[in-house]
Image (spheres, grey):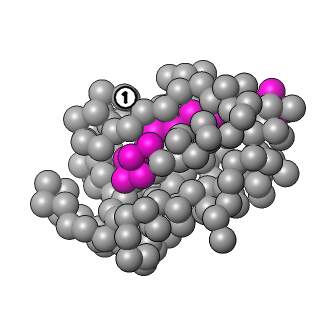
Amino acid sequence: MSKTFNKLVKVLSKKNLTISTMESCTGGYIVNSITNIAGSSNILKYSAITYSNEYKIAMGINPSIIDKYSVYSIETAQEMAINISNYSKSNIGIGITGKLNRKDESNNYGKDNEVFISIYYDNRFYNTQIIVDKKTRRQNKELIKNTIITKLEELFI
């Protein structure tokens, strides 16, 4: 079942909380899903799609984290979450990195179907690692979106 950000947009808006995302493998799917909801402008501050290591680093990711743990790691997702939160001055930052059933010759680390999600809020990280085992990229992005919504609902609803 596909989840939506409807309830979260209302709750975060009432709590005067803002959100920003730094997405890699989802390519903007999460921010697009948020902006599909009326009232999302009350909570959404900023979003960055950082497909390449170059632009992750340009957005503040410490290169030594990528070198030590790889771009496909919870440590990189955490860096993405905190950096986008700090950059945009959002209460909540979401960082997503991983592979959607494909090899990456430039970053030959990690499993080809593993995604790392970090939500940064109130000086804490809420981390999730999932296996994306659906047939299409869109289905895998939907799985990631549902996982994020569930985690945010646990935190705020």
Establish if 77 lies above or below 80.
below
What residue is shown at x 28% (from left), y 33% (from top)?
55
**Region rendered in magenta:** 15-28
| Residue under numbered circle 1 | 59
Quadrant holding the N terminus? bottom right
What residue is shown at x 85% (from left), y 32% (from top)?
15
Pointer 1 local density, CA inside 10 Å: few below 14, some 14–19, many at least 20: some
Image quarter of residue 103: bottom left
Establish if 104 lies above or below 66.
below
Helix, strand or loop for the magenta stretch, by majority: loop
Pick out the residue farthest to the left: 105
Q: Residue 121 location, x and y as percent?
A: 67, 40
Whether residue 91 is visible to the viewer of this picture, yes or no, is: no
Name the kind of residue labelled 1 in the image: Met
Residue 29 in the figure: left or right of residue 108: right
Q: Residue 120 location, x and y as percent?
A: 61, 42
Residue 39 in the figure: left or right of residue 147: right
What residue is shown at x 74% (from left), y 30% (from top)?
39
Establish if 84 lies above or below 4.
above
Q: Residue 106 location, x and y as percent?
A: 14, 54
Q: Is residue 5 magenta?
A: no
Between residue 125 and residue 21, name the one nearer to us: 21
Residue 58 in the figure: left or right of residue 127: left
